[in-house]
Image: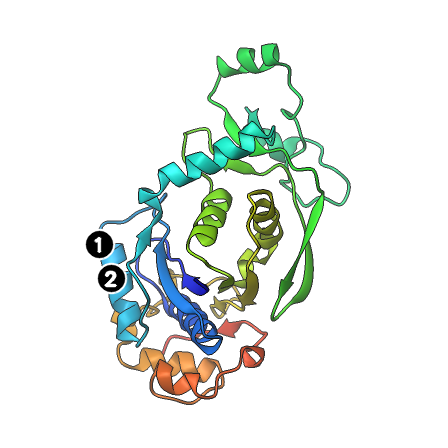
């Protein structure tokens, strides 16, 4: 199967920026002859009833999807299998560092702030055993590259840092970077359309996909919706959800894209990926 996807976290209602990204993901998938699937990323921050409302809002703006909704909370065995495969090849190590320790540690030249400095990479078994007495270990990927390059339909060639990123947190929860790579491979996702705040994550995920024997997907990182202060749109910015904006929601999204049409199907007739705006959408809630 060849597919695109939208993968919301059920931590609250979708705002108009989320719905805009969902529409673009749907248009990109349908325009290129792919299936379109919904994956609920519910490993963290789940709010009761949010998934139901999110799916209802996607349907309300005219989006449909193929097959059943997939939930990450039901897929632990696949993440465990991927971890076991990597560990069996010596590509996983235990890490006992706190976030504070990582932020305060000297980092490699040219590495962005917060990049893992390799503190626990080469601990002896005796050192690991001693540190296990203090705190549970996270599991990190033993990366053998410093950077990895991906292709993006809007951003072109993008080279990003790949450090020894977390695969499973110290509390036992699987990390986003591992879950999303495993899920995309198993669902046949070969096109990823999402907000451009995640562009810097793409090299890590593409590199991990290659280690797990998968072909990295093609990427389309689209501009976010921002508030009038230039910050990411959030519910505190006023009327930003479908429930608050009502029937005008779809029209506002379409206008922000410089397109014309009263339904996703109408938009699909003239949609081209290359026409997606490159600049953020500054959203001002209607009076």
Residue 222 at x, y percent in the picture: 53, 68
| Quadrant of res 280 | bottom right
Q: Which of 245 and 146 is in front in this view?
A: 146
Q: Residues within 10 Å of mark 1 (few under 14, many from 20)?
A: few
Residue 129, can we see it?
A: yes
Q: Which residue matches tag 1?
A: 49
Which structural element holds mark 1?
Answer: loop
Residue drawn at 26 percent across, 77 percent down: 246
Residue 287, can we see it?
A: no
Please say if the residues under marks 2 and 1 sit with CB atoms less than 8 Å apart.
Answer: yes
Residue drawn at 59 percent across, 51 percent down: 206
| Quadrant of res 253 | bottom left
Seen in the picture, residue 107 relative to 70 is either above or below; the reply is above
Q: Nearer the viewer, residue 91 or 2?
A: 2
Seen in the picture, residue 234 relative to 136 is either above or below; the reply is below
| Quadrant of res 238 | bottom left
Seen in the picture, residue 243 relative to 139 is either above or below; the reply is below
Residue drawn at 38 percent across, 69 percent down: 19
Residue 85 at x, y percent in the picture: 52, 34
Q: Which residue matches tag 2?
A: 53
Which structural element holds mark 2?
Answer: helix
Label 2 – label 1 distance at C-alpha: 6 Å
Q: In which quarter of the image is the C terminus?
A: bottom left
């Amino acid at each position: 199967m060849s597919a695109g996807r939208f993968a919301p976290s059920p931590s609250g209602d979708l705002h108009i920026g989320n719905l805009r990204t969902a529409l673009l993901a749907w248009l990109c998938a349908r325009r290129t002859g792919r299936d379109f699937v919904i994956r609920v990323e519910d490993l963290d921050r789940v709010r009761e009833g949010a998934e139901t409302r999110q799916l209802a809002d996607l349907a309300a703006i005219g989006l449909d999807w193929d097959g059943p909704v997939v939930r990450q909370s039901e897929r632990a065995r696949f993440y465990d299998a991927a971890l076991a495969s990597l560990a069996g090849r010596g590509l996983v190590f235990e890490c006992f560092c706190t976030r504070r320790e990582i932020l305060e540690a000297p980092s490699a030249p040219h590495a962005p702030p917060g990049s893992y400095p390799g503190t626990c990479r080469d601990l002896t078994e005796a050192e690991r055993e001693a540190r296990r007495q203090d705190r549970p270990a996270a599991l990190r990927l033993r990366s053998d590259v410093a950077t990895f390059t991906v292709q993006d339909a809007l951003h072109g060639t993008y080279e990003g840092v790949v450090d020894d990123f977390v695969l499973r947190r110290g509390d036992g929860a699987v990390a986003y970077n591992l879950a999303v790579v495993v899920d995309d491979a198993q669902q046949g996702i070969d096109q990823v359309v999402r907000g451009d705040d995640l562009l810097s994550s793409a090299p890590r995920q593409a590199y991990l996909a290659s280690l797990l024997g998968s072909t990295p997907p093609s990427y389309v990182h689209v501009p976010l919706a921002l508030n009038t202060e230039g910050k990411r749109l959030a519910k505190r910015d006023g009327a930003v959800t479908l429930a608050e904006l009502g029937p005008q929601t779809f029209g506002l999204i379409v206008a922000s894209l410089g397109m014309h049409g009263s339904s996703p199907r109408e938009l699909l007739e003239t949609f081209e990926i290359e026409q997606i705006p490159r600049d953020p959408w500054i959203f001002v809630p209607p009076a």
